[in-house]
Amino acid sequence: MKNTSVMNLILLATSLATNRAATQFKSDKHNMEKDSIRLEMQRVLINEFRLWYPLSIDPLYGGFFSDINYNWEVTGQQTKMIVTQARHVWSTANASMYYKDDTTLLPISRNGIEFLREKMWDKDFGGFYDLVTRRGDPIRENGKIVKRAYGNAFAVYGLAANFKASGDTAALSLAQETFRWLEKHCYDPQNGGYFQFTSREGVPFVDGCDGAPPKDQNSTIHLLEAFTELYSVWPDPVVKERLQSLLLLVRDRITTDKGYMVLFFKRDWTPISYRTSSADVRERNYEFDHVSFGHDIETAYLMLEASKVLGIKDNTRTLAVGKKMVDHSITFGWDKERGGIYDGGYYLPGEEKPTIVRNTKEWWSQVEALNSLLLMSELYPNDEHRYFEKFRAQWEYCKKYVIDTEHGGWYWGGIDIVPNNKFMPKSTIWKCNYHTSRALINCITMLN
């Protein structure tokens, strides 16, 4: 009897030791994978900034070049957009806080602010012009100058980040002035949120502009993003109130119960939908009504950042909605064969699952997926969705199909779907290094 008990104890101890060894092996392997990915990302990030600067700096008129071709040659008209110019300001300021010993990035950010202040800010009516020529002359759209909440939000984002990095009170002052302009001309006190379009004088287009509805998720999530950055350096009570309201608006109204966002709205937040229309009408209005998996997976991160900056202690609701958005994206918008996030889906009438209607995979969605998947793996390490495995597969997808190993930088989209993306521009008014540098820095930081 004693021998049997001793034998059982020996077997139990052996089993426990084996399990501990297996667990330790898995842990060591996991950490090695994380270290390997971190080092790869660090190399990509270093190359990213080496390619963009000083090449993209416009030495003649200031600001940044918009048009750079596939092999990093500056060519084209160089129309300048507030969104891209401000994103350069943000990217370089943010990177200067990551590369703490660097002395080149903040002067580049200041160069961008100078162009914003001297050329893109409307000295007569306030607010930033949306589009200007290379030298800084405002460009008319359909015969009129249009200002956008979206573009002014990015100005706030970049200026606040520069102040955070440099302590330059002039940058903060311009961010504050831009916030007040948005409050005066775009904020809707009746229905909440912000009108996207105004005239040059700041009169809001309450019914939309040139066929586009007056409110949308894209400007709203980036106002959320901008006010998060602003509140982190300027804890003003009005900024706090607006940031809180935007978080609730994105989380509880724009995001559906299924976990995706409605894209466009009327002034009272009635959703724009073509679901019951013909296939032809749905296709013609694709930009106004579809499932944007990339925006959904990005917004999960933006909501959690806002909640953190606001100091919200009970984060249960925001965490649950953010997780649902990520889960919806990887369940229905993930290429299960090669990896990567598809650009667009659609809930057809009578269907409970979205159909993929755009199987292309733009670069920004892929890097935002990296960021949010790794974040979810930290928050929910044992979840059935196996976020770290998805993150690892997504990084492999990016290396194989989105990162240009010949010329450097990121293709416009995955070359598994569009091989010609190899020859698409590395920079346009819609493409710079904001998504890529943020995601890489965030991921490297988490992997550390």
Image (tube, helix red, strand yellow):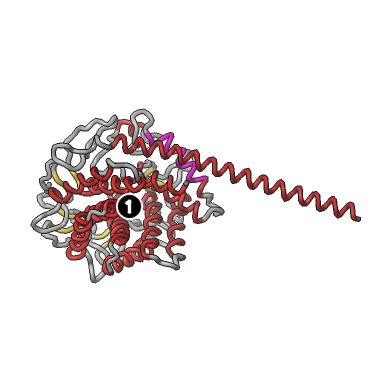
- Which residue is depicted at the point 34% across and 58% down? 262
Between 279 and 400, the residue placed more toward the observer is 400
Left or right: residue 61 compared with residue 220: left
Q: Which residue is mark 1?
A: 278
Magenta-colored stretch includes residue 137: no
Q: What amino acid type is highlighted by mark number 1?
A: Ser
Residue at the outermost top position: 406
Q: Position of residue 33 (x, y in %)?
A: 53, 41
From this viewpoint, is residue 141 visible?
no
- Prevailing secondary structure of the magenta residues: helix
Q: Residues within 10 Å of mark 1 (few under 14, many from 20)?
A: few
Q: Where, quadrant-wise, is the N terminus in this rendering? A: bottom right
Relative height, residue 72 to residue 133 (above, below): above
- Which residue is depicted at the point 21% across and 65% down? 183
| Part of the protein shown in magenta | 389-403
Relative height, residue 110 to residue 36 (above, below): below
Between 39 and 320, the residue placed more toward the observer is 39
- Where disc 1 sits, the SS reads loop
Magenta-colored stretch includes residue 398: yes
From this viewpoint, is residue 379 visible?
yes
Q: Position of residue 294 (x, y in %)?
A: 38, 49
Q: Position of residue 410 (x, y in %)?
A: 35, 37
Between 81 and 289, the residue placed more toward the observer is 81
